[in-house]
Amino acid sequence: MSTWPYPAPADCGGALHLTPGTEIPDLALPSTLGGETSVARVPGLSVVFIYPWTGRPGLANPPDWDLIPGAHGSTPEAEGFRDLYPEYLALGAEVFGLSCQDEHHQREFAARVKLPFALLSDSAAMLRRTLALPAFETGGVTYLKRLTFVVRDGRLVRVFYPVHPPDKHAGEVLSWLRAQS
């Protein structure tokens, strides 16, 4: 049982169109591991957890962040995937994180929390617009809502939305993958 202190997001229906078999667009996104990655071209199984924003020590949260259901939790969510990463690899699944933050911000975060997998930047909102991903706005900035794709050979297999609590989500996805094996 999670003791997550922030409000749970409601299912706004923003991911209903993301059904199994949906083709992931072939978009090369900047990666914290260098170069660019297109999830559509990754062979086999991938898990892409999409998060709104990661803070930095000394940097204030966006306006009203504490009041937005589902906004908090990107660091614990990423740490959950980091901690379970060997188990994902053992199931043949690669893990990616994705947000609209630029790659410089993501690189700092990945180094600080020691992520072994790539974070992908959709700072140009190409994936958000192409797939009509659910998003919210605060302080004049648009952020992706938290959701996770399971992708096999460029096609959606499963979408987790809404995600709550984020600190337990990596285990939830891993359990689902194990049940499919």
Image (cartoon, rainbow, N blue to C red):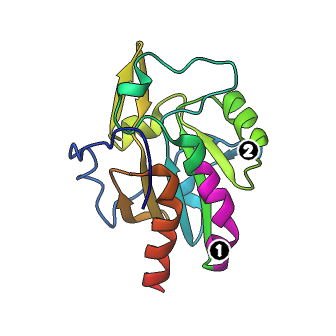
State the image quarter where residue 70 is shown: top left
- Across and down, in percent, residue 58 comes to 69, 19
Is residue 80 rendered magenta in the image? yes
Query: Badge 1 local density, few (<14 within 10 Å), some, or many (20+)?
Result: some
Report helix, strand or loop for mark 2: loop
Q: Is residue 62 left or right of residue 56?
A: left
* Residue shown at the point (48%, 63%) measured from the top left: 154
Q: Amino acid at mark 2?
A: Val
State the image quarter where residue 159 is shown: bottom left
Q: Mark 2 — residue?
A: 113
* Residue shown at the point (43%, 29%) measured from the top left: 143
Q: Is residue 172 above or below residue 53?
A: below
Is residue 41 rendered magenta in the image? no
Q: Amino acid at mark 1?
A: Glu
Residue 67 appears in the rendering = yes
Distance, label 1 to label 2, CA atoms, is 18 Å
- Across and down, in percent, residue 176 comes to 43, 74
Residue bounds of the magenta highlight = 78-90
Q: Which is nearer the eye, 153 or 69?
A: 69
Residue 25 appears in the rendering = no
Q: Which is nearer the eye, 99 or 146?
A: 146
- Across and down, in percent, residue 164 comes to 38, 51
Query: Which of the numbered marks, if any, corresponds to residue 87?
Result: 1
Q: Is residue 82 left or right of residue 15?
A: right
Give yes or no for contact between labels 1 and 2 (Cβ–Cβ under 8 Å): no
Report helix, strand or loop for mark 1: helix
* Residue shown at the point (52%, 66%) measured from the top left: 171
Q: Residue furthest top?
A: 140
Chief secondary structure of the magenta portion? helix
